Image: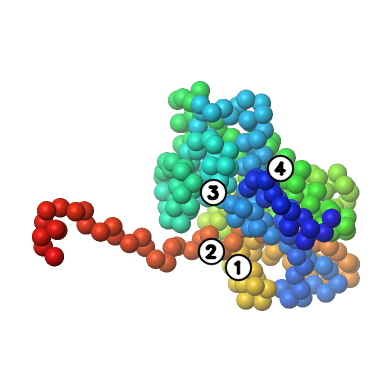
Amino acid sequence: MSIRLTRSRRLSSVLDAVGNTPLIRLERVAASAPGVEVYVKLEFMNPGGSVKDRPAMRMMLDAIKDGRLTQDRVLIDSTSGNTGVAYSLMGAALGYRVQLVMPSNVTKARKDITQAFGTELIYSDPMEGSDGAIRLVREIVAKNPDRYFYPDQYSNPSNPLAHYLGTGREIWEQTGGRVTHFVTGIGTSGTVMGTGRRLKDYRRDIEIWAVEPDDALHGLEGLKHMASSLVPAIYHPDELNGVIAMPTEEAWDVSDRLAKEEGLLVGHSSGGSLAGGMRLARQLAAAHRPGVVVTLFPDRADRYFEAPIQKQQPPPAYTEDTATSG
Ligand SMILES: Cc1ncc(COP(=O)(O)O)c(C=O)c1O
């Protein structure tokens, strides 16, 4: 089935709009690797604006099916942002209450988006980053386990499974089985683990590479520097062909080029994924080997922009004074 046909389906709910994202070929930014085809999967085309719609939906549907998520429980989890938007959207669409723990310094836009869906926010220490949010949500759930459904995206097998069932199969079909390399950034590692497993089931010699920030202090939101982080239980580096340590500057430069040369305004983790993919593509080109390198763009850059216009101050409340003074 062509992508055009897939995306023009008439859908019965927002849930059906998750997945089947476009795969596009990059010509200009990939020109430094002649003879190698470079493709990107546009995960920002999901209805919540990021790749995270896939695991959030799978984790919720699997939990509803086996009774871990019921109407009298609150879904609670920690999130750096995109998963929170995805839970919020799914919670609204499926009719479940959602609470999110996030570092208090996440952007105002993130807070506004999740709250717009009716989600309640709990803030963790900004100095402790995403690991601090994980620790706090664990404390809250431990105190009151019957009240919550805690999907725990870092340990939940439904997270990589979403990519095994969706992303991996789609990439195989969209490349007509020609994909030779898949490269993407790691946060929870759900994307690289699940997609990688599916592609290796199709053909063992497809190479699967992860990209991680090269330093604990980095500017690649959504990605984790594993050596200095709580390592996700779903992360199994032994299943990968390798991990590329990505400097922030290299990823940011690629993001800038994507906007100016390809018309793709993507987040910095997308720049990191493609920067990693381009390293592999250039190695192939230097060895005069053909290849079909696929990378993945988790979200768009405008998700990280602060709202340019502040909410207007509400007019003063009506009192006898305001009624007579003007
Ligand atoms: C912007 C962004 N990039 C990349 C990732 C990494 O995806 P995964 O958690 O599947 O490893 C995430 C996930 O949190 C993300 O939000």
Badge 1 density bin: few <14, some 14–19, many ≥20, Cα 10 Å: some
Is label 4 within 8 A of ligand 1 (CB to nearest ligand atom)? Answer: no
Q: Earlier in the sequence, mark 2 or mark 1?
A: 1
Callout 4 touching callout 2 (CB < 8 Å): no
> Which of the labelled discs sits on residue 302, or is there none?
2
Residue at position x 53%, y 35% in the image: 96
At mark 3, the secondary structure is: helix
Q: Earlier in the sequence, mark 4 or mark 3?
A: 3
Residue at position x 66%, y 26% in the image: 66
> Which of the labelled discs sits on residue 250, or is there none?
none
Badge 3 density bin: few <14, some 14–19, many ≥20, Cα 10 Å: many
Can you give x and y, in whole percent of width and height, for residue 216 in the image?
55, 53
Q: CA distance from mark 4 to mark 1?
A: 25 Å
Q: Which residue is mark 1?
A: 265
Can you give x and y, in whole percent of width and height, for residue 274 in the image?
70, 64
**Residue 85 in the image: above or below residue 161:** below
316 and 182: which is toward the camera: 316
104 and 1: which is toward the camera: 1
The N terminus appears in which quarter of the rendering? Answer: bottom right
Identify the amino acid type marked 1: Leu
Callout 4 touching callout 1 (CB < 8 Å): no
Q: CA distance from mark 2 to mark 3?
A: 14 Å
> Which of the labelled discs sits on residue 85, or is there none?
3
Q: Which residue is mark 4?
A: 162
Left or right of 134, for residue 317: left
Identify the amino acid type marked 4: Ala
Residue at position x 79%, y 52% in the image: 170
At mark 1, the secondary structure is: loop
Callout 2 touching callout 1 (CB < 8 Å): yes
Q: Earlier in the sequence, mark 2 or mark 3?
A: 3
Q: CA distance from mark 4 to mark 3?
A: 17 Å
Identify the amino acid type marked 2: Asp
